Image (cartoon, helix red, strand yellow):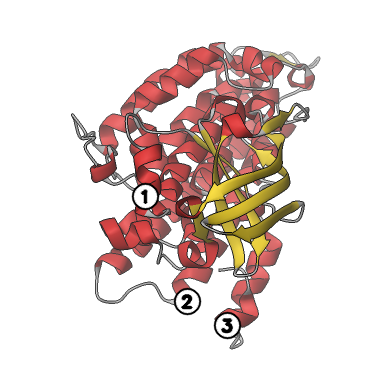
Amino acid sequence: MTQTTTQIATTEQLVRQARELVPDLRQRAVETDQLRRLPDTTVGEIHDLGILGAMVPTQLGGTDLGSVAVFDACVELARGSASSAWVAGNWAVHGALGAMFPVEAHAELFSDKLPTIATGFSPWRGNTEPADGGAYLSGDWDFCSGVNHSDWIVVQAIGERGAIAHLVPTSEVTILDNWNTNGLRGTGSHDVHIDHIFVPQHRLLNMGDSGDGNSAGAAEYGTTTLRLPLSQVFGTGVIATVIGSSLGAIDAFTGKTADTIGGLSGVKRSSRPEVHLVLGKAASDIDAAATVVRATLREMEAALESDEGLTLEMRVRGRRNSAWAGQLAAAALSSIYEIAGARSLFRGDPLEQAYRDGIAASHHNHLSWDRLYVGYGELMMGATETDLMMV
């Protein structure tokens, strides 16, 4: 590749710049909700932020800062706009996914800029048929976050060789405008339809290889990020959105309740001990959730950088930890909303939006705590990787 990175950002720079965007993101929060997609201004800010290349090898124009950098930056973004953090995190992780494809695809993906890539990973309404030099693809896919502003989309379908990811320009898909939800409305996570298009071989990726960290891109560039199993990093922006939304709820609550009088009591809400208790516990739980996620990602990266490698226990525990963190942060968010009073029922209230968005983010499959707790329990009782089907 001829593209080079002119300036290698640090994680601290990325997180600081993300934090500086929070006030403007908050000002556009209602607009984002009403549009049901990100405003163009926000899309431009995400491009300028540098998060798109944070998990992309430097040879492809990225900065390869790693998953912790994406997590920390998205936590900050979510304090201002959960939908913006969600899409930015998805694009950052999908940049790594794009780099996992065969090298021939990289000339199309990374030739002149860092791409924005949406995904549709639910394969059950898709069909792929092998053909000379590639495959024919048809079907429908849901939850394609950020697709309105994405250059490419990766959709998954089950073929003769198992689950196959297909890299397709968004100009070749039909976006179905059906994303009308209670939370994360601004993510524009519409369905897409594809009508029998040809996808060349170099734009096909065996999901088993990416799931094991053995993709063509990992072999070519050897970065730690690309060698992490996709299932371990795919939800980085997801859990960051839940945690950041919870912090945004604390910001909104403390910002508007300092001088308010509760009900008919004549007592300032900010002086009530039960409010102090809820805030103290919520802040502690959110900190704990973020600390565990960050430590888990670092542990996995360190294992790959050593001779030890990732063990099955690490992988299952990593998924369990994300689910636990999501459950803990969502509960903290709910506890804040419950003490906020009737004025936080109104649509457009910052706390009301943080609550809707954060709880919606916690519903992502990556954070299915019941299934993932069971998976870890099964491992403790001697289950094998084949038995688990969730790593």
Sequence-wise, the earlier of marks 3 and 1 is 1
Residue topped by disc 1: 104
Q: Position of residue 45 (x, y in %)?
A: 42, 19
Q: Say what secondary structure mark 3 lies in.
A: helix
Query: Does 73 sit left or right of 174 as displayed?
Result: left
- Residue visible at 73% across and 13% down in the picture: 266
**Residue in the foreground of this view, choosing between 67 and 294:** 67
Amino acid type at circle 1 is Glu
Alpha-carbon span between mark 3 and mark 2: 11 Å
Q: Which residue is mark 2?
A: 312
Mark yes or no: residue 166 visible: yes
Which mark, residue 380? Answer: 3
- Viewer can see residue 67: no
Dot 2 amino acid type: Leu
Mark 1, secondary structure of its residue: helix
Residue 213 x/y as whole percent: 41, 65
